[in-house]
């Protein structure tokens, strides 16, 4: 196999500096119901703080809230929380469901 001088590649190194990364002050997880349509946008607006990152995970829920549907939802909470990568070093995880948080937690 012969090398083609026109196809040779040049590797060039560029000087660079890295910053502290996303969420260098705080990384916050949020469990959001699958039916919620506004929470991520609302919290992104409220949490527009330099160095603070917000990560979301959805969890299944029923449209009608009953003790039985809340029990099913409670089973989903750990799984949804696990979907937020542990390597992110999340400082806290919030659960965004008023009735669920009242009954389940």
Image (cartoon, rainbow, N blue to C red):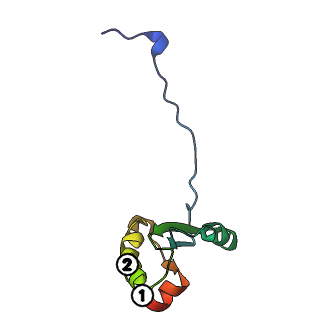
Say which element carries label 1.
helix
- The residue that disc 1 covers is 67
Residue, x 57% and y 43% (percent of image)? 15
**Could you tell me if the residues under marks 1 and 2 are in contact, i.e. CB atoms within 8 Å?**
no
| Residue 105 visible within the image | no
User: Which of 16 and 7 lies nearest the eye of the viewer?
Assistant: 7
Residue 105 - label:
none
Q: Residues within 10 Å of mark 2 (few under 14, many from 20)?
A: some
x, y (%) of residue 104? Answer: 42, 88
Say which element carries label 2.
helix
Quadrant into which the C terminus falls:
bottom left
- The residue that disc 2 covers is 72
Q: How many marks?
A: 2
Residue, x 38% and y 74% (percent of image)? 76
| Residue 46 visible within the image | yes
Image-based side of 43 in relation to 7, left or right: right
Sequence order check, earlier mark of 1 and 2: 1
User: Which of 69 and 99 lies nearest the eye of the viewer?
Assistant: 69
User: Which of 20 and 60 lies nearest the eye of the viewer?
Assistant: 60
Residue, x 67% and y 71% (percent of image)? 42
x, y (%) of residue 46? Answer: 68, 74
Image-based side of 87 in relation to 54, left or right: left
Image-based side of 43 in relation to 61, left or right: right
């Amino acid at each position: 196999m012969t090398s083609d001088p026109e196809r040779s590649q040049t590797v060039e190194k560029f000087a660079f500096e890295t910053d502290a990364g996303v969420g260098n002050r705080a990384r916050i997880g949020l469990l959001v119901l699958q039916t919620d349509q506004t929470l991520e946008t609302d919290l992104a607006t409220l949490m527009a703080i330099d160095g603070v990152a917000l990560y979301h995970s959805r969890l299944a829920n029923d449209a009608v809230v009953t003790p039985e549907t809340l029990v099913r939802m409670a089973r989903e909470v750990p799984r949804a929380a696990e979907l937020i990568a542990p390597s992110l070093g999340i400082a806290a995880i919030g659960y965004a469901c008023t009735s669920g948080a009242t009954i389940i937690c």
